[in-house]
Image (cartoon, rainbow, N blue to C red):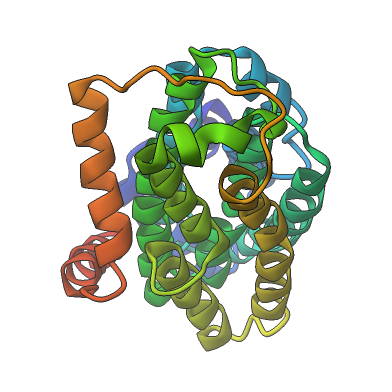
Amino acid sequence: CSMIYGSTGATHFDQLAKILTGYEITGTRSSGLLMGILSIAVGSLFKITAVPLHMWAPDIYEGSPTPVTAFLSIAPKISISANMSRVSIVGSYGGTLQQIFFFCSIASMILGALAAMAQTKVKRPLAHSSIGHVGYIRTGLSCGTIEGIQSLLIGIFIYASMTIDAFAIVPALRQTRVKYIADLGALAKTNPISAMTFSITMFSYAGIPPLAGFCSKFYLFFAALGCGAYFLAPVGVVTSVIGRFYYIRLAKRMFFDRPRTWILYEPMDRDKSLLLAMTSSFITSSFPYPSPLFDLTHQMALSSYL
């Protein structure tokens, strides 16, 4: 921010938009402004665990308390994506940011899908899933269009609901010392409602219709094709198919595998149960009834251009 302020004398979005528009008209380029924008982009990609700035995420997700992990999974992505959607579409520097987001999206989708396949603990696949979904969400910013921004917002809303759902269930499992995926074998028999809810969330992460995750990925890939990113959409489809392996593996472990130890899970409290009910309802109803979400995100996307 200091480099941007030193080059332009402004910090507000409206003032920066006017300055960048003037630079674009006159063909002026400022190296200080470019370095400031790149520094903000790198810092933002680090906070949202985008490849290649993702190395800290799996260990932090595994070692932190689950509420902290949920906060780290959701809050930075919402705030930073909202800010980047305002600055990545303005002026001649938007093309540079779009190229950065393009390559980070591809790398995040590929690594998130492949790295999660080798994990044996419960929370580490969710960390790599977060990295992969950063790639999907960045697809919207790679477009630099209003459709891309809208698809970005749809992806954030749906990702946040799925993550809240998943991390509301994980604490109940960890309170009974469930640490490895193999320990989930008895969940469907001892707590079938939690097993069903967790499976629905995993299927939504995988993008299986008619759940919200499919709606999110469909609109993101559709926006990528609409802006000419013909390579980005097929990569997203392929990595989404690969990623279904570890999501479905969790459901298989809960319902079909014989448990190595029988664990009696502690019941959830009322607040978590209500939270799960709300997020699960959103996950299952967003695809059949998408109009409210589409109308809201469309208005928000329009405001980023005004």
Relative image position of residue 230 (x, y in whole percent): 68, 85
Front residue of this view, candidates 250 and 135: 250
Relative image position of residue 59 (x, y in whole percent): 72, 21
Q: Is residue 139 left or right of residue 237?
A: left
Front residue of this view, candidates 12 and 182: 182
Front residue of this view, candidates 130 and 275: 275
| Residue shown at 54% from the left, 83% from the top | 227
Q: Is residue 96 visible?
A: yes
Answer with the quarter of the image where residue 200 lies: bottom left
Relative image position of residue 50 (x, y in whole percent): 67, 43
Q: Is residue 10 visible?
A: no
**Relative to 300, does residue 54 appear above or below in the rendering?**
above
| Residue shown at 23% from the left, 54% from the top | 281
**Relative to 196, does residue 73 appear above or below in the rendering?**
above
| Residue shown at 56% from the left, 34% from the top | 186
The number of numbered discs placed on residues in the rendered structure image is 0
Q: Is residue 12 left or right of residue 208?
A: left
Front residue of this view, candidates 291 and 102: 291
Answer with the quarter of the image where residue 57 lies: top right
Q: Quadrant of the C terminus?
A: bottom left
Q: Is residue 155 left or right of residue 117?
A: left
Relative image position of residue 58 (x, y in whole percent): 71, 28
| Residue shown at 43% from the left, 67% from the top | 216
